[in-house]
Amino acid sequence: MMHQKIIFFYFFITSAIALYAQQERIEYLPTFDKRKIHYGFYLGFNQNDLKVGMRDIEAVPDANIAVSPTIGFNVGMIADLRLHKNLNLRLEPGLMTNTKNINFNHLPLANEQTREVSVTYLHIPLLFKFSTDRYKNIRPYVLAGLSYDYNFSSNEANQDDNSSGQFRMKTSNYMYEVGVGIDIYLYFFKFSPSIRGVFAINNEIKYDKDSNSKWTAPIDYMGTRGVFLTLAFE
């Protein structure tokens, strides 16, 4: 449901501003896309869920794990290199924060069932941006690339694990992301809303010391699956 709200908000704000830009007869920033390098910044929202792959083990035969995500915030900088009139290479380092509740529904005690995971990532994506030709004051595009994520809140080095109430994840993670967006040329700057999907490549969970842990042993894979709404100003 939250994913749908983010997508709806993206299409609403994009359609409203694009309609305004198209009604203007003046072509704003006519030489902007001829720059070899330009910079900007972005703000946005994210909803990062976790994909959980399970395995059957005798120690925890009825394992049932669910994740409840919330909406987080992201902010960062943009460095854009023009490779071709329709192709750019972008580096977009920034910070991303969000919170998730991981519910171990197979455990009987309330203090064992839920682990709140609040994370702050240093998110460093390197993206290719494929754009159409400009039409008046708008220019649609698609994005694709890879990112490195450093999890400041991972607790990977913490010696305590779930038996002490501490859920741990890996500090270094790798993801790929794809998205669509539209450049909207305004009088003083270019506004570029985009919506993106972010998907972890590696397994992000740090397993408990007990190989038969009732929290982590049933988990074969746990990785981020997220939706980003990014509002860029260039």
Image (cartoon, helix red, strand yellow):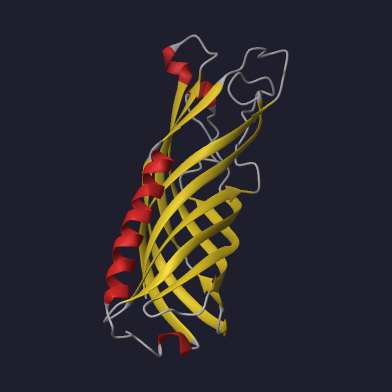
Q: Position of residue 145 (x, y in %)?
A: 60, 63
Task: Name above or below for residue 176 compared with residue 70.
Answer: below
Q: Is residue 24 left or right of residue 50?
A: left
Say if 133 sits above or below 160 in the image: below
Residue shown at 52% from the left, 25% from the top: 66
**How many numbered dots are placed on residues in this image?**
0
Which quarter of the rendered picture does the N terminus lie within? top left
Quadrant of the image for the C terminus? bottom left
Point out the residue furthest to the top here.
108
Residue 85 on image: x %, y %: 55, 84
Q: Relative to the observer, which residue lies in front, 25 or 34?
A: 25
Residue sitting at x 59%, y 63%:
144
Q: Position of residue 106 (x, y in %)?
A: 55, 13
**Where does residue 65 sit, x and y in percent of width and height?**
55, 23
Instruction: Name the residue rendered at 54%, 43% in the picture.
Output: 225
Q: Front-most of 113 and 192?
A: 192
The one nearer the camera, 20 or 148, is 20
Q: From the viewer's perspective, is residue 5 above or below residue 132?
A: above
**Rendered image quadrant of residue 78:** bottom left
Q: Quadrant of residue 30?
A: bottom left
Q: Nearer the viewer, residue 152 or 13?
A: 13
